[in-house]
Image: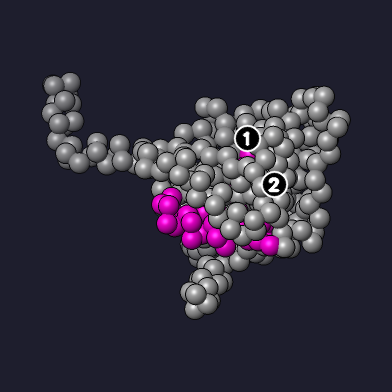
Amino acid sequence: SMAAAEPAARKRRPKGHFAAAAGRAKRPRGGGGRQLEAGMRGILITCNMNERKCVGEAYSLLGEYGDLLYGPEQFSDHEERLSGSEREEDEDDVEAALKKEVGQIRASTEQKLRRFQSVESGANNVVFIRTRGIEPENLVHHILKDMHTTKKKKTRVILRMLPISGTCKAFMEDMKKYAETFFEPWFKAPNKGTFQIVYKARNNSHMSREEVIKELAGIVGSLNPENKVDLNNPQYTIVVEIIKNVCCLSVVRDYVLFRKYNLQEVVKSNKEDIQQTPSNLTEEQNSKVVKPETEEEEMSSKEVKQENK
């Protein structure tokens, strides 16, 4: 009977079938190569539970302010054409279909070069949005300053939004070498400031919080002895976020005033808000902080440093 034949047919499935399906299920959405790694810049966003909704909120918030600060994003003209041809769904012939497919493949490659691109962060309740051609510190400071001023709640699931201006491997030697150059725009004489270091590690057990803070504070001190620690209201907060074997770094202003860059807290009314005004990030200050965007530039600046040693 048919009923009896069914289980037998099911048994004949190749052994690897379920393993492959399980592997597919585990693989991050968005496919290969799209995960947080050394050499990226972007924005680290924490949420509770609903990562997919968090990514949606992030795209919409960053898109809104990105357009305001940097103008609308430029897409290639054939991506425009592609969406145009999709509207007229009547071209049935093979050649058109083929052309369209090639266009879609090309468009998906170009999509990787978008201003904001969600990549797999390597930790639960953390979303990482890779940025291109913009300065995360500026953009995020601008968003928080606006929300702090208007007290308009713009997100439901996003908790904190931390700019990440540099990433390196999460090993002490890599971090020390990287930080020596990375900290220069803020802390190298004649520049100076009061600072604190905030540290968080996820899915990483080989780094010691105390050691990292001690070493990084030492580097800041060596760039200019006038840099002083201030845990109450520092001008600069050095954010160290470690996920697996990637160390994410940035130097932010108004960390205390903007409630540790928490979008839910910054829109609440607080007494201290009246006494304190956010620091103005003017264009000149920002231009000091621009780091090389392309990997080639980064390589060449590394090589130059090697030669100078």
Q: Quadrant of residue 190?
A: bottom right
Q: Quadrant of residue 74?
A: bottom right
Q: Is residue 8 magenta?
A: no
Query: Could you say where residue 257 lies in the image, as x and y percent from the top left?
Result: 75, 35
| Residue sitting nearer the eye, 107 or 53 | 53
| Residue sitting nearer the eye, 270 or 2 | 270
Can the viewer see residue 246 in this picture? yes
Q: Residues within 10 Å of mark 2 (few under 14, many from 20)?
A: some
Q: Which residue is mark 2?
A: 194
Between circles 1 and 2, the one closer to the viewer is: 2
Q: Is residue 232 above or below residue 212?
A: above
Q: Which residues are magenta?
A: 161-189
Query: Could you say where residue 121 lies in the image, as x and y percent from the top left?
Result: 48, 43
Q: CA distance from mark 1 to mark 2?
A: 23 Å
Left or right position of 195 against 171: right
Name the kind of residue labelled 1 in the image: Arg
Outermost residue on the bottom side: it is 307
Which residue is found at the position 67% from the left and 40% from the top? Answer: 230
Tell me the SS state at disc 1. strand
Left or right position of 189 against 166: right
Which residue is found at the position 52% from the left and 77% from the top? Answer: 308
In terms of sequence position, does the residue under pointer 1 or pointer 2 come before the other? 1
Q: Which residue is mark 1?
A: 160
Tell me the SS state at disc 2. strand
Q: Residues within 10 Å of mark 1 (few under 14, many from 20)?
A: many
Name the kind of residue labelled 2 in the image: Thr
Query: Could you say where residue 210 lies in the image, as x and y percent from the top left?
Result: 47, 40
Which residue is found at the position 65% from the left and 37% from the top? Answer: 231
Q: Is residue 170 magenta?
A: yes
In the rendering, which numbered label is found on residue 13?
Answer: none
